[in-house]
Amino acid sequence: MRTVVGNQLTSIFNQKCNFKDLTVSCLQGQVIGVVGADETSLSKLMGIMAGHFNPSSGRVLYDGSELGQKGGEVNAPLEMFSKGAIFPSIGFLERIFSSSKYMLSRADLILRYFPTINKDEIKKGAKLNSQDKAPVRLAHYLSFSHKAFFLDFPFEGFSEQQIQSSLSLFRELADRFKDLILVTGCDQEKLKTVCDVIYSTDTNAEVFEKNPPPVYEDTPTEEVSK
């Protein structure tokens, strides 16, 4: 399983520590929420875990390989979806020839939750700036196979129904494809309905963990007399 670990991450934004000593541990097949009052802290933490910013202390590990480690599996910033845009943004042809592949099976699943979007929009990810097309950009990002999905305030321009549909989609993507999905910018109570774990940059700690499924002891089957 792929593991993402942020050990004692600290932000250097404007020389201010917006969060400190926060350990985030994730496994494939999990949806991880991150909440906090300071939007800058949330975005900065997401950027650090995706490799776009360096922590002033601590490490980010993927399956034991440090992000940015020369010769390691993960040696470059990973894609993230930030406030309606894929960052860093790359063209469709570059995606096709990269390790991140578009998957029709993923697109079919997305269409179940967003039936008003068509497959062509999902695949091409056309430059759509109107708010009513905001879900298309997210759908395009989710239709590719990634090491992990970093969703930094992904619901810009979304209706409440579209947010609920997206959260349900995240849960099914994680369950079916063993995706690792990290999301910020969403109400904590909503996140609790789909997340395995929620961390807070306010308390620098885990604030929610989904209860594991109950374990039932095997009950002996009664023998039927003949």
Image (spheres, helix red, strand yellow):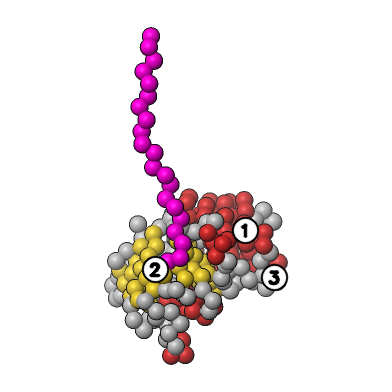
- Identified by mark 2, the residue type is Val
Q: Which image quadrant for residue 75?
A: bottom left
The residue depicted at 37 percent of the width and 76 percent of the height is 21
Q: Which image quadrant for residue 218?
A: top left
Q: Which quarter of the figure is the N terminus placed in?
A: bottom left
- Does the magenta stretch mainly form a helix, a strand or a loop? loop
Mark 1 and mark 2 in contact? Answer it, CB < 8 Å. no
- Depth check: give the residue in front, 222 or 53: 222
Q: Position of residue 63 (x, y in %)?
A: 32, 64
Give the number of the disc on residue 89: none
Note whether residue 44 is visible: yes
Give the residue number, with chain letter if any, for mark 1: 164
Please give the count of numbered marks on the rendered protein: 3
Q: Which quarter of the figure is the C terminus placed in?
A: top left
Asked if the stretch drawn in magenta spans residue 223, the answer is yes
Q: Earlier in the sequence, mark 3 or mark 2?
A: 2
- Depth check: give the residue in front, 68 or 223: 223
Q: Position of residue 30 (x, y in %)?
A: 44, 58
- Identified by mark 1, the residue type is Gln
Give the residue number, with chain letter if any, for mark 2: 24
Q: Earlier in the sequence, mark 1 or mark 2?
A: 2
The residue depicted at 30 percent of the width and 69 percent of the height is 65
Asked if the stretch drawn in magenta spans residue 225, the answer is yes
Between circles 1 and 3, the one closer to the viewer is 1
What segment carries the magenta color?
206-226
Crowding near pointer 3: few (<14 within 10 Å), some, many (20+)?
A: few
11, above or below 117, in the image: below
180, above or below 16, in the image: above
Q: Position of residue 58 (x, y in %)?
A: 33, 77
Note whether residue 182 is visible: no
Give the residue number, with chain letter if any, for mark 3: 131
